[in-house]
Amino acid sequence: MRLAKVTIDQSYVVDLDDEVMVQEAKNNLYEDLMNAVKYNELFQWIELGNEDPTLKPEDITECLRKEPDDG
């Protein structure tokens, strides 16, 4: 079994000492997200990462795990 993460990644680099910049970046991310939803572009943000040997099968969220066959 090869494991990797599917992620949504959008970010801004900020100066942690500049609270105004940090807040503006948060606002920009919010606006980016709202526009991506509004214009049906959010799927373009979703990326498949590289195989990660540090991940374990138990890291897979329960909703994605296959149910055993009842038959």
Image: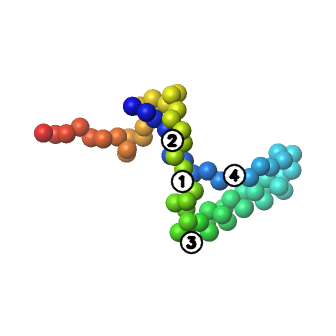
Mark 1 closeness class: few <14, some 14–19, many ≥20 residues within 10 Å = few
Give how far apart the Cα atoms at labels 3 and 1 are.
Answer: 15 Å
For disc 3, the marked residue is: 39
Label 4 is placed on what type of residue? Ser
Q: CA distance from mark 1 to mark 4?
A: 13 Å
Q: How is the image coloured?
A: rainbow
Q: Position of residue 37 (x, y in %)?
A: 55, 67
* Amino acid on which disc 2 is placed: Lys
Instruction: Indicate which disc, 4 or 3, sits on the residue closer to the N terminus.
Output: 4
Q: Which residue has dot 1 on it?
A: 46
How far apart marks 4 and 3 lie (CA) works out to 19 Å
Residue ID at (42%, 40%): 61
**Residue at numbered disc 4:** 11
- Along the polypeptide, which appears first: circle 4 or circle 2? 2
Determine which residue is flagged by label 2: 5
SS type, badge 4: loop
Kindly identify the amino acid type of the residue bearing the numbered disc 3.
Answer: Tyr
Location of residue 68 in the rendering, given as x and y in whole percent from the top left corner: 23, 37
The residue shown at (67%, 65%) is 31
Residue occupying image coordinates x 43% and y 33%: 2
Few, some or many C-alpha atoms within 10 Å of disc 3 (few <14, some 14-19, many ≥20)? few
